[in-house]
Image (cartoon, grey):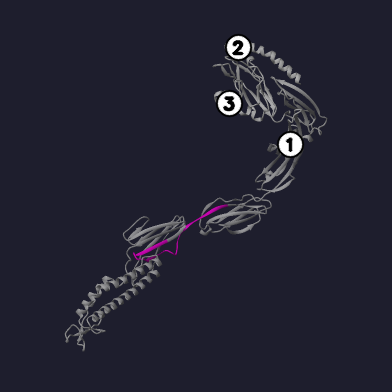
Amino acid sequence: MFQHRVETMWCLELLLPLLLIINDARCQWNVWVPRDISAMTNSCVVIPCTFMYPSGIRPYRGTHGIWYFGQPYPQLFPPVVFKSRTDVVHESYKGRTKLLGDLNQRNCTLLINNIGAEHSGKYYFRADLGGANMYTYPDFSELKVLDQPNIDIPEEIVSDVSLELTCYAPDNCPEMTPEIQWMYIDYLPDPEISSDFLEDGNTAVLSSTLTFTPRPMHNGQLLGCRVYYPNTTLVYERLISLDIKYSPRSVWVNVSSEVMEGSSVMLHCEVDSNPPSRISWMFGDQELLWDTASNVSLSLDDVTPAQEGIYTCYGDNGYGIMNTSLYLAVNYPPREPVVNDSMTILEGSTLALHCSTQGSPAPTLTWLKDGELVGTITADELSVLEIVEVTPQGDGQYRCLAENEHGRASSSFNITVEYAPVLLEESKCTVVREGVQCVCIATGNPEPTIEFYLPDVNVTINETDGRYNFYTHTDGHTSTGMIKLREKGERVDNGGPAVNVHCSFFNTYGRESVQLELQQEKKYMMAVIVGTIGGVAVIAFIIAAVRYVGHNNKKENGTPRQDVVLENPALYYSAVKKDKQNLRKKVLKTELLGSKFNSILEETTGEDGDYQPVGSLAGLERQELNYAALEFIGARSREGASGRGDDDSNYTEIKAK
């Protein structure tokens, strides 16, 4: 092997002058290096190199060169692998590189020792002829540092067909020669091994070929190639898993089964083959699903009775075909019932509602109205619900429910009943603070229109008059109208107001007019009664206050207490005037009590109270005026009386007329 390598180098030395002569004629910058070269990690590698430059250039002070790693341009500061002018190189190449060629002979061959994975990459050569005659050649040699040998594996390994596997080891290190061994071949039938030495572009490779006939049982088993350098500790190994192609050997599917309509079922198919087969699920002549894999599952969702039958799984990988079948049975719940369309009918009509469906076993049919059971439950595929003389209460949603042991289904529709308007008993007139309030409430379909009629005017929607306010509201099939009369009307024999209000309500199917009755609300009457009692209490309070003021006045003047007799009416009236401010304060308190009472009535009844406090300031003036109109009768003198008047002063009794 070493002798062969020496002969190769000798041939290069003979060819080099010839290449130089040819390139001199071309007078171009040019370099020749192997485009790809490989070496095992921790070994060495020699990169052959020859460069050319124009013949008109004369080297100044000798020919020099630089090897760069990764980049050809100095301005990018690529790592320096080797430099002939100095020993300054990149840290990762210190003590590792050596120039084997003679630059003066245009030979730039480079040796790199103890290489590692970090040294994999592109290497560029730069010629330095002195002065401005420097040139970096764009061509490069790409080094691949291997940590394991390469194994040449055929694209296809077929069972029962002879197979050749080749293991390669680079031989580009002059000082070290590799050797190759095959591993884990004891289980192979009759293996054969041969070796060879290959050269390509001044790069050398050692190869070893293993030949045998594989079987399906060998699929997935391991084989190995070991490369080592004698007299060193360098050993490299690579393991591969055999990928043996063979036709389908078995096809497995589910057992036959039953499923319910609407449920989901998964049909599994597994095929033993290599490569994985094209697995397809067939239903009759229809292909439902296919995929290239070792197993395929067919998912059937919302299964129907139409999907009942034979399902077949086929496995085909190009090396053979195989199939297996199963039977799928389908049970199903009731179909969606067929029912009437939604309808609008007139009150008093007669209806026949139909519901039909299919199911296995035969379903039961149930009629529901707004969720409540109506009619009878029928164990058949057809049910008829008859409704005689429909009333407004027949309006609503009707649903037919079909059920069996496997499930249920339902369909629904709406029935709208139209009818003439009907007056509700809440309609009436009541007395309120502002006057009389009349409310008219009617229900019907379509919703009724409400009008109020007074003796002197016909009231319609949005009309207004000085005597009333009009309001109307519709909620579903119920309409509400309301007016407020600001006058309480004439008084009748029983003392109440006379009200003549007519409510007219109508829709497509009829019109009716009713006179609304006046009803005295208990809460209003209670307010009147309480107000009257409160007024009497206030009057009594004022009389007591007047007497109290008179009593105080007499005490201030040193006069003994007199219960009924007054010394001088004019003086007493004057005393009442002087104490008017005190009376006003007390009366104001009474007015506040009346206001509070009115607030309580509003919260309780929801209406303005009609209570008016008795004993206001205006009432006070009336009390004073009444007192001035008192008559003095039967005047007489009192013995032992003393006061500011003369001894013969007359006293008069006060009597209320």
The structure residue drawn at horizontal position 80% and vertical position 27%, both measured from the top left corner, is: 193
The reply to whether the magenta stretch includes residue 276 is no
Residue under label 3, please give it. Answer: 78
Q: Nearer the viewer, mark 2 or mark 1?
A: 2
Rendering quarter of residue 512: bottom left
Residue 467, how many percent across, how many down? 32, 61
Highlighted magenta segment, given as a residue range: 412-440
Q: Nearer the viewer, residue 97 or 380?
A: 97
Relative to 632, residue 470 above or below? above
Taking 623 as reference, is 473 above or below it? above
The one nearer the camera, 519 or 82, is 82
- Secondary element type, mark 3: loop
* Quadrant into which the N terminus falls: top right
Lower sequence index among marks 3 and 1: 3
Query: Which of the pair 305/622 is nearer the observer?
Result: 622
Which residue has dot 2 on it?
26
The numbered disc on residue 247 is none
Q: Is residue 433 above or below residue 182?
A: below
Q: Tag 3: residue type?
A: Pro
Q: Main secondary structure of the magenta part?
A: strand
| Mark 2 and mark 1: Cα distance apart in space | 65 Å
Query: Which amino acid type is marked by label 2?
Result: Arg
The image's mark for residue 315 is: 1
Q: Is 280 placed left or right of 599 in the picture?
A: right
Amino acid type of the residue tagged 1 in the rendering: Gly
Residue 436 in the image, given as x and y percentages of width and height: 35, 65
Cα distance between the residues tagged 3 and 1: 58 Å
Can the viewer see residue 165 in this picture?
A: no
